[in-house]
């Protein structure tokens, strides 16, 4: 993965991962689960054609089955996942769901509808959060699961918007076609002119609003389920999962500050306040 891809895709998550690791989840199981998600997410960008990508994903399908049978392949991440599965409950069907979604992504990297994109986010980001809930023995809670579902959609849109300049440089449009069409956005114009393309800021605004709505819904789940005047706070034991909402909230706020210009250089810079916000969110039990 080149440095641009690392900065766009991995660094924001690593910031959050390292801090949440320090706060509570000082566990190799968490790192192993995260590593597998990064490996699967990076396949599309690291292969020269879809057939090679499908072969790599088939390897992971077989690996998940072998891990469940106690016969992991001699691959560092597969071995780490096998070790993790011996220490925690990591349902293999969640891994299979992520693999199937990444496989479909090889053929349809551009989504025509918002419904299609949110279904993909549910099968990738949300499912990764379900794995983390399983890791913490919290998967039986409908409140946690529903909140994680919405958080996964919000985080997926956040990542896509942050990576919009990178994808545009590769001739890819990550905002669903129904949204860009509504605002008269021409893809070729975005690829050439970036944030100066007609209608792109309006399309970004609509897409970001979907992310914000899902983030608010995830928070609302805790308000609806709170008892005894807890004020909708997230139970401390679940905070390692829901800390993921803080970088998303932070990015959406920064995006609004630049009038929804996703190509603004300031959005590609690391926010030095983010670790402090994550730390504060953990102790205040909110995201």
Image (spheres, grey):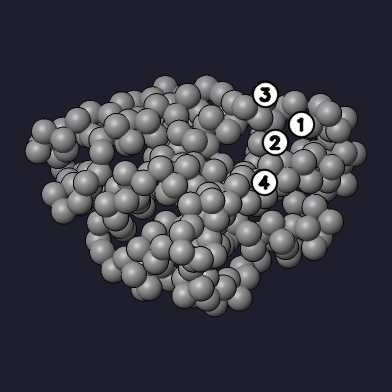
Label 1, label 3: how far apart the Cα atoms are: 9 Å
Q: Which residue is mark 2?
A: 175
Q: Position of residue 142 (x, y in %)?
A: 40, 43
N-term mark: 4 or 2:
2
Left or right, 194 with respect to 17, comes to: right
Which part of the image, by quadrant, shows the C terminus? Answer: bottom right
Q: What secondary structure is marked by label 4?
A: helix
CA–CA distance between discs 3 and 2?
9 Å
Q: CA distance from mark 1 to mark 2?
A: 7 Å
Q: Which mark is residue 179?
A: 1
Mark 4 vs mark 2, foreground winner is: 4
Q: Residues within 10 Å of mark 4 (few under 14, many from 20)?
A: some
Q: Is residue 117 left or right of residue 129?
A: right
- Choose between 56 and 103: the one closer to the eye: 103
Q: Are marks 1 and 2 in contact (CB under 8 Å)?
A: yes
Task: Give the residue number, with chain letter if any, for mark 4.
Answer: 213
Pair 1/4: label in front: 4
Give the class, few, some or many, for how many residues have Cα within 10 Å of label 1's Cα (few <14, many ≥20): some
Query: Looking at the image, which is closer to me, 197 or 181?
Result: 181
As drawn, the residue found furthest toward the front would be: 228
Is disc 3 placed on a helix, strand or loop? loop
Q: Nearer the viewer, residue 234 or 41?
A: 234
> What residue appears at the point 25 percent right and 35 percent down from the top-left corner?
92
| Image coords of residue 275 (percent x, y) | 52, 73
- The residue drawn where x is 52% and y is 37% is 121
Give the distance between the C-alpha atoms of the residues marked 4 and 2, in whole angstroms.
Answer: 16 Å
User: From the viewer's perspective, is 215 left or right of 94?
Assistant: right
């Amino acid at each position: 993965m080149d440095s641009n891809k690392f900065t766009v895709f991995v660094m924001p998550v690593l910031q959050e991962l390292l801090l949440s690791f320090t706060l509570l989840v000082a566990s190799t199981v968490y790192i192993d689960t995260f590593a597998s998600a990064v490996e699967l997410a990076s396949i599309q960008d690291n292969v020269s054609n879809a057939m090679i990508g499908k072969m790599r994903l088939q390897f992971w399908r077989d690996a998940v089955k072998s891990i469940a049978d106690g016969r992991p392949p001699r691959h560092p991440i597969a071995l780490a996942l096998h070790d993790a599965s011996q220490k925690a409950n990591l349902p293999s069907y969640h891994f299979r769901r992520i693999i199937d979604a990444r496989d479909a992504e090889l053929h349809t990297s551009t989504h025509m509808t918002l419904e299609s994109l949110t279904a993909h986010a549910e099968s990738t980001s949300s499912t990764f959060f379900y794995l983390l809930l399983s890791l913490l023995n919290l998967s039986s809670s409908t409140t946690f699961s529903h909140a994680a579902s919405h958080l996964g959609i919000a985080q997926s849109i956040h990542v896509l918007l942050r990576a919009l300049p990178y994808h545009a440089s590769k001739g890819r449009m990550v905002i669903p076609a129904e949204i860009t069409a509504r605002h008269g956005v021409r893809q070729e114009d975005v690829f050439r002119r970036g944030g100066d393309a007609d209608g792109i800021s309006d399309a970004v605004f609509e897409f970001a609003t979907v992310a914000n709505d899902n983030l608010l819904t995830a928070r609302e789940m805790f308000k609806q389920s709170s008892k005894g005047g807890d004020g909708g706070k997230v139970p401390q034991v679940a905070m390692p999962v829901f800390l993921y909402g803080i970088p998303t909230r932070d990015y959406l706020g920064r995006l609004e500050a630049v009038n929804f210009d996703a190509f603004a250089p300031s959005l590609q810079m690391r926010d030095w306040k983010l670790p402090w916000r994550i730390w504060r969110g953990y102790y205040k039990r909110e995201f």
